[in-house]
Image (cartoon, rainbow, N blue to C red):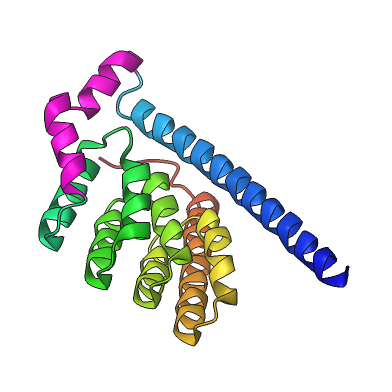
Amino acid sequence: MFRTLILLIIFVGGIYFLMNKKKQDAVEAQKIEEIKKQEIKELDPNLPDYIKEDYMLNFSKNTIDTLKNLVSDTNENVRFSAIELLWQLKERDVDRIIKRSFDMETESSIKIKIIDMLSKEKSKLSLHLIAYALKNYDKDARVRACEVMGDFVDKETITLLTPALKDYEDDVRIKALDSINKVKKSIEQHRESKLKEILEPKPIFKVE
C-alpha cells in the first residue's frame, strides 16, 4: 500500500513538472515572438508590415529549407554556418532553430560560437536566446553565456542572469555575478551621465 502511494505521488509529480515546463516554454515562446515583431517594426516605422517581413527574407523558401536541414549536418562547421546565415536573414523560426541547436549540439565549441554570434547583436531577441543557453548541460556554454551577457546594458539582463547565481558550478556563479555587477555599473554610469547632462548649466548665448 505504501509503495503504491509513493508511486502515485511520483506519477502525479511528474505530470505536474511536465505541465509546468510546457507552460513556461509557451510563455517564453510568446515573449520571443513579441520581441521579434518589435524588432521588425523598428526597421522603418513608415514601411507597411508585409514589406518589412519581405525585407527580412531575401532567400527562396527552397534555400531556407535547405539551410534548415544543414543545421543537422554531420560536419560541425556546416552546422554553424547554416545557423549563422539563418540568423543573419532573421528567418522567422530562427529562435526555435537556435534553441534546438543548443539542445542537440554535442560540441561545446559550436555552442560557444553561437553564443558569440548572438552577442554581436545587442537586441532583446539575442539576449533571450543567450539566456536560454544558461539552462544547457554544457558548463562551458553556460560560463560563456554569463560572460557575454555582461555586455547587454539592460535591467532585464540582471533578471535573466539571476537564476545562474544558483548554478551548481562555481565558475558559472562567479561569471554571472561578475556580469551582474558589470551591467549594474554600466547602468549607473549611464544614469549619472544623463543626470550630469540635465543638470549642467547651458550657455545663454551660443557662439557659432
Q: Is residue 47 visible?
A: no
> Viewer-proximal residue, 83 or 66?
66
- Specify the quadrant of the image occupied by residue 9: bottom right
Residue at the spot x=60%, y=75% of the render? Answer: 166
Where residue 92 appears, as percent x and y from the top left, is 32, 32
Image quadrant occupied by the N terminus: bottom right
Which residues, given as a range, are shown in magenta? 46-71
Where residue 73 appears, as percent x and y from the top left, is 15, 53
Q: Is residue 61 magenta?
A: yes
Where residue 203 appears, as percent x and y from the top left, is 43, 47
Is residue 82 toward the left or the right of residue 90 in the image? left
Count of numbered labels shown in the rendering? 0
Q: Is residue 13 visible?
A: yes
Farthest residue to the right: give it.
1
Is residue 139 toward the left or the right of residue 30 in the image? left
Residue at the spot x=44%, y=51% of the render? Answer: 128
Where residue 111 appears, as percent x and y from the top left, is 28, 64
Q: Is residue 7 magenta?
A: no
Image quadrant occupied by the C terminus: top left
